[in-house]
Amino acid sequence: MTTGTESTATVRGQEVSTEHYIGGSRVASEATFEDRAPYSRELLADVARGGKAEAEAAAQAAEKAFPEWAALGAAGRSPYLHRLADLIDENVERIAEVECDDMAMLIRSLKARVIGRGARNYRSYADLAVAYEERDWSSNGTWNRVQRMPAGPAAVITPWNAPFMLSTWKTAPALAAGCTVVLKPPEWAPLSCSMLAELADEAGLPAGVFNVLQGIGEEAGAALVARPEMRRISFTGSPETGRLIATTAAGNLVPFTAELGGKNPLIVFADADLEAAAQKAAGQYDDAGQVCLAGTRLLVEESVLDEFTKLFKSKAAEHVLGDPRDDATTVSPLIHPDHLSRVEGFVDRARDAGDKIVIGGRPSDAGELFYEPTLVEPASNDSEIVQREVFGPVLTLQTFADEAEAIELANSTEYGLSGIVYTASAERAERVGRAVRAGTVWVNTFLVRDLTAPFGGIGISGIGREGGDYALDFYSDLKTLQILDGTTE
């Protein structure tokens, strides 16, 4: 690990540091790792590859900065976070240009909604923290108050799909609550998180309040969560990695929250607007299916299967695989060759097991990392393709006879992140919405988010909740203050 020099990469005319950001300074490492663009496969950057030494430095920087940041109070921290939000708004175009090359989300989505959501996150949590009202009451001859205290340095590990926005989603409540942060970006798409560090510096956040540790998950991430300075850990990724982090967190008795993906049902009842339902179902191929909330298990009432399938195939055929910068493109490439192999393996095993490939089922000739939008009719609900998260442009299609069977199928996996229901009946929407085991259920819509609502999963989809006061409570220690009635100065 060295300091005093800075390496940068130029992406679409934007200069981005490839080094860590620790204690208010850029820090290099002796080793690096390659970061390549999913669409062009060109080398974007050689990025600093952190390990135990860099994790220690980042954790200690966050610990050193914590007392002063915590002492500011929510009102004192709010101007910093609002300034950071303003800077994100001013730099949406720059960030979108880099993230489009780095992880291949459609440029129009990044510019129109995804990057700007980062600014909303910082503003919303800054305001929520300021508005927090401590709970007061009298009991047993005492006056009581519950106080929310900053917990300490927080380790935040984010995934490679929408890395900028998801990093702000986690760091915003941590910072607003008074924690300092060490952010570990995804190694498959790290560059926009480096830009976030640049904006945090420009916003004037004190040195050590916001740190970025680059590196491979098994190295930098593992070293970071093992650091005793870290008093909160937030992770988004796979259940397998989540279990490893949870074990480390338990060893240090550190609270841990995790969002670990889903195998989410999209339930279509016969009374639904089938045109809208088919359109939304075909839309689950967006971002090449690399969306944890996507409704990947289509559950359709038997009586409308033929009509729905015809509509779905028609709408799925409208997708265009291509350059994420092209306005005609609707499906972008997968993130990495390893991930393409994973997706391809799921479908190949499904085919070998006797599951029916209705559409797609193979890599596309649109480019090196493209996979065709695929629909599979499984031979059994126990099929691997039904039970495990693929995280690619692969959906399954099953039928149900009645509401009870729809609910049974919806709840038949170990996951429980989200669900989507299409029905014209408000009564059914209420019944099924309550019965589906998931952290979020949408009815006749999808991906509409209120930032104050709880977000998280059930089963192996995760632990804990993010969003609103739920996130602020996670990054805080709660204290009950009791004062005997009649106590005077």
Image (spheres, helix red, strand yellow):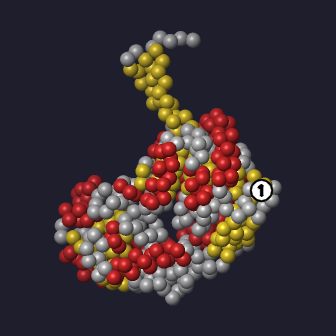
Judge left or right: residue 227 versus residue 404: right
Depth check, front residue: 59 or 98: 59
Judge left or right: residue 423 versus residue 207: left
Residue 256 rendering spot, x and y as whole percentages: 48, 47
Is 406 above or below relative to 314?
above
List the single residue furthest toward the right: 4
What residue sits 60% from the left and 62% below the top? 216
Residue 191 can be seen in this image = yes
| Quadrant occupied by the N terminus | bottom right
Is 459 above or below relative to 340?
above
Disc 1 secondary structure class: strand
Total tally of numbered discs in the picture: 1
Q: Circle 1 sits on which residue?
A: 2
List the single residue furthest toward the bottom: 365
Residue 325 rendering spot, x and y as whole percentages: 60, 78
What residue sits 26% from the left and 59% below the top? 432
What residue sits 73% from the left and 69% below the top? 9
Residue type indicated by callout 1: Thr
Dot 1 alpha-carbon crowd within 10 angstroms: few under 14, some 14 to 19, many 20 or more? few
What residue sits 63% from the left and 61% below the top? 215
Residue 171 can be seen in this image = no
| Quadrant occupied by the C terminus | top right
Depth check, front residue: 472 or 383: 383
Residue 473 rendering spot, x and y as whole percentages: 48, 41
Judge left or right: residue 469 versus residue 154: left
Residue 394 rendering spot, x and y as whole percentages: 40, 76
